[in-house]
Amino acid sequence: MDTKRLSSSLEEALSTQMNVELSQSHTYLSYGIWATDKGYGGIGNFLFRHSLEERNHAIKFMQYILNRGGKPTVTALGAPAPDPQSLQNCFNQVFKHEVDNTEKIYNLVNMAMEEKDWATWNFLQWFVKEQIEEETLAMDLIDKLKIAGGDRATDESLFNLDKDLGAAEDDAELARNATSENP
């Protein structure tokens, strides 16, 4: 008896997104290494934590595919983008990555809706909420750097920004704590 509860096209698309999340994790890891190497250990730590979060998103996709009787496919990761040229460039890239990822999630939601796969549509709502939080977090990074002075920030303001981001709790609690009972 066939127990697979995903169409082949959705199984493939969800596997692709799992690999996108792994690639995002890889990118944030490389940004964290770059920031730490530049002396921004707090920002590096923040980006390392974000890398782990992206990996956890990949695991969420993997588990869902397996739970629906599918088999996720892991693909090779490409090299991350080149190192940022500045903190401003780094934070702008973080925002761009999140916006691109949001579009990918929306495409999956549309696919699930077109296929009337309501279980997958429901599963993806967690990621819709998460992407709102991810984009907001990225915009906050850009805003904090602007407040610190942007490209003309003083050493003291960058020191404080680095310290604050290193100690910051993850703000995106809503989706991270969501359950089927408490979406």
Image (cartoon, rainbow, N blue to C red):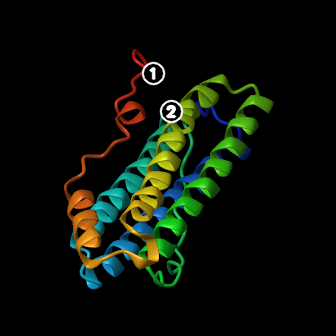
Could you say which is closer to the camera, residue 142 or residue 134?
142
Residue 123 image offset from top left, x and y in percent:
54, 31
Q: Quadrant of residue 100?
A: bottom right
Q: Residue at x 24, y 81 (%)?
A: 39
x, y percentage for residue 79?
A: 51, 81
**Whole-percent x, y for residue 127 in the image:** 53, 39
* Depth check, front residue: 75 or 87: 87
Residue 25's quadrant in the figure?
Answer: bottom left
Q: Name the side, left or right, on which 116 lies relative to 180.
A: right
Local packing at callout 2 (Cα closer than 10 Å; few below 14, some 14-19, many 20+) is some
Could you give the CA–CA distance between mark 2 and mark 1, rounded to whole angstroms? 7 Å
Residue nearest the viewer, comparing 136 with 151: 151
User: Could you tell me which residue is drawn at 24 percent across and 51 percent down?
Assistant: 168
- 155 lies left or right of 59: left
Residue density around tag 1, few if under 14, some if 14–19, many if 20 or more, within 10 Å: few
Q: Earlier in the sequence, mark 2 or mark 1?
A: 2
Residue 136, given in percent of the width and then of the height, sits at 49, 46
Identify the amino acid type marked 1.
Pro
- Tag 2 and tag 1, C-beta contact below 8 Å: yes
Q: Is residue 12 found left or right of 52 in the rendered image?
A: right
Height in image: 40 above or below 145?
Answer: below
Label 1: state its secondary structure.
loop
Quarter containing the N terminus: top right
User: In terms of secondary structure, where does tag 2 sit?
Assistant: helix
Q: Which mark is residue 126?
A: 2
As drawn, 126 above or below 94: above
Report the disc number at residue 183.
1
